[in-house]
Image: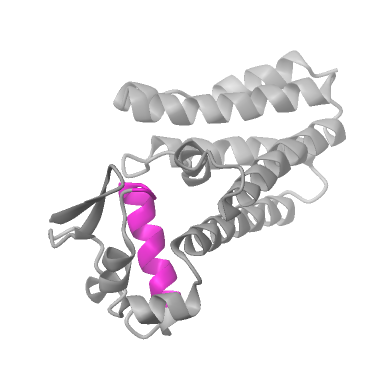
Amino acid sequence: MSTETTHGRTEILHDRTPDDGRLEDRPHDRLPPRARILAAASDLFYRHGIRAVGVEAIAEAARTNKMTLYRHFASKDELVAEYLRRLAGDADAAWHSLETGHPGDARAQLRGWLAMMNDHIADPAARGCALANAAVELPEKDHPARRVIEDHKRGVRDKLAELCRRAGLQQPDLVADGLFALLEGTHVCAQSIGEAGRAFDLVRMGEALIEAHSR
């Protein structure tokens, strides 16, 4: 791996280890350039962090060049925003799958969401919530990704509140706040204390909160 220090921070330029996520080792070669760039950036940003990854590393992993990258994305910041926008869209699709899997059953949808989040947290390969990680790395309020992050997080909390109301829970907003805080906190625990944190049972904790506010 080679690195370059710019404005006090180190950026990854090349990463040639066997498990470095280079796209020639993955089934992305037939994707058009924009999709390859986004796929490469998504992998590198999540594994190494947004600030640590330079555009040269992204272009190399996507088997293209910086000129092509900037043709599709006006700046690295815009690429970061699109990366997070895609993740938020995936989360929206997950909500839809819960609705179709448990039509008209808000409590089952809540339980399904808890199980889905618990599986992600327990995954040893996971590095927490990508949007929460990005929020820590990108404190600037004028960064184009900030609105993506904040809108998504508010949307998750609001969706939980809606489901809590439809499930007939007492103090649905309070329960939604609690479930949201449990999720965010458990993500942090999984990253900060490793296996012990990943063993936290979000399902049991969340269901205990739901049961405590059931009528």
* Nearer-the-camera pick, 49 or 66: 66
State the predominant SS element of the stretch in magenta: helix
Q: Which residues are magenta?
A: 35-51
The image shows residue 107 at horizontal and vertical percentages of 75, 35
| Side of 90 relative to 187 (left or right) | right
Judge whether 194 appears above or below 5 on screen: above
* Nearer-the-camera pick, 109 or 145: 145
* 8 in magenta: no
Judge whether 178 appears above or below 116 on screen: above
Q: Residue at x 77, y 20 (%)?
A: 174
Q: Residue at x 49, y 78 (%)?
A: 72
* Nearer-the-camera pick, 82 or 194: 82
The image shows residue 167 at horizontal and vertical percentages of 82, 32
Residue 203 in sight in this render: no
The image shows residue 138 at horizontal and vertical percentages of 49, 43
* 37 in magenta: yes
Judge whether 182 appears above or below 18 on screen: above
Q: Residue at x 40, y 76 (%)?
A: 69
Residue 57 figure quarter: bottom left
Count of numbered labels shown in the rendering: 0
Q: Which corner quadrant holds the C terminus? A: top right
| Side of 168 relative to 32 (left or right) | right
- Quick one: which residue is furthest to the top in this view? 212
